[in-house]
Image (cartoon, helix red, strand yellow):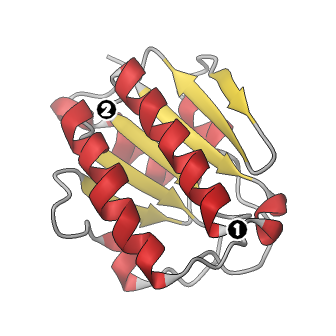
Amino acid sequence: MAQAGAPSKSAESLIQGQAMSATQIYDAKFLTILWNEKTRTIGIDWKETTAAMKDEDFKADLTHFAGEVERRGARGILVDVSRFRHKMDPEVQQWRIKDISSRYNAAGVERFAFLFPEGAQVPPMMNQSSPGEKFTTRAFTNLDQAENWLSEIGGQSAAD
């Protein structure tokens, strides 16, 4: 997914927003999940270990993450792919849309941001929602831009 390069600032930095603390709610071999109650933003910080990830591992981690999105009523999602190294089979992408994105829709997610390393070439498809996704998807290489975009959920800044 992401091109090799220096890791961007992590999802943790983004969802801390406005000097608020993010809470680490899950840490495993391939990812860390962080939550910011004030901004109702949840994030995945994928780890370098994803180079050894299998499709089954990816599915298990995303299934766990979708459960956290539902439990917490997240409105914004940030997925930091700067260190994501797994190469998934094409059918896994279809599974993600059918089985995971539908859960994000039902939970009321409004915005979904991918964070790539600074200077990365972002594939155009990363700046659009997949068919059936009710939330808006954008990709960023700049943490501040991603933070500003996610903070506009509901027409108000999360700092309000």
Q: Is residue 55 visible?
A: yes
The disc at residue 100 is: none
**Mark 1 to mark 2: distance in Å?**
29 Å
Is 58 left or right of 160, judged from the image as shown? right
Tell me: 39 left or right of 29. left
Left or right of 7: which side holds 2? Answer: left
The percent coordinates of residue 104 (x first, y second) are 30, 42
| Element marked by disc 2 | loop
| Residue at (64% x, 22% y) in the render | 25
| Percent position of residue 26, x then y | 68, 28
* Residue 158 vs residue 98, the one in the foreground: 98
SS of the residue under disc 1:
loop
- Judged left or right of residue 71, residue 155 is left
**Residue at (74%, 64%) from the top-left corner?**
83
Nearest the viewer among 5 and 69 is: 69
Mark 1 or mark 2, which is nearer to you?
1
Residue 126 figure quarter: bottom left
Give the tally of numbered discs: 2
**What kind of residue is marked 2?**
Arg
Residue that carries the numbered disc 1 in the rendered image:
54
Q: Position of residue 121 (x, y in %)?
A: 56, 84
Q: Residues within 10 Å of mark 1 (few under 14, many from 20)?
A: few
What residue lies at 75% left-to-right and 51% top-to-bottom? 30
Q: Is residue 117 visible?
A: no
Measured along the vertical axis of the image, is residue 90 above or below residue 135? below
* Image point (35%, 27%), residue name: 70
Residue 154, picture quadrant: top left
**In the rendered view of the protein, which quadrant contains the N terminus?**
bottom right
Disc assigned to residue 75: 2
Q: Quadrant of residue 41?
A: top left
Question: Circle 2: is it few (<14), some (14-19), or many (20+) Cα within 10 Å?
Answer: many
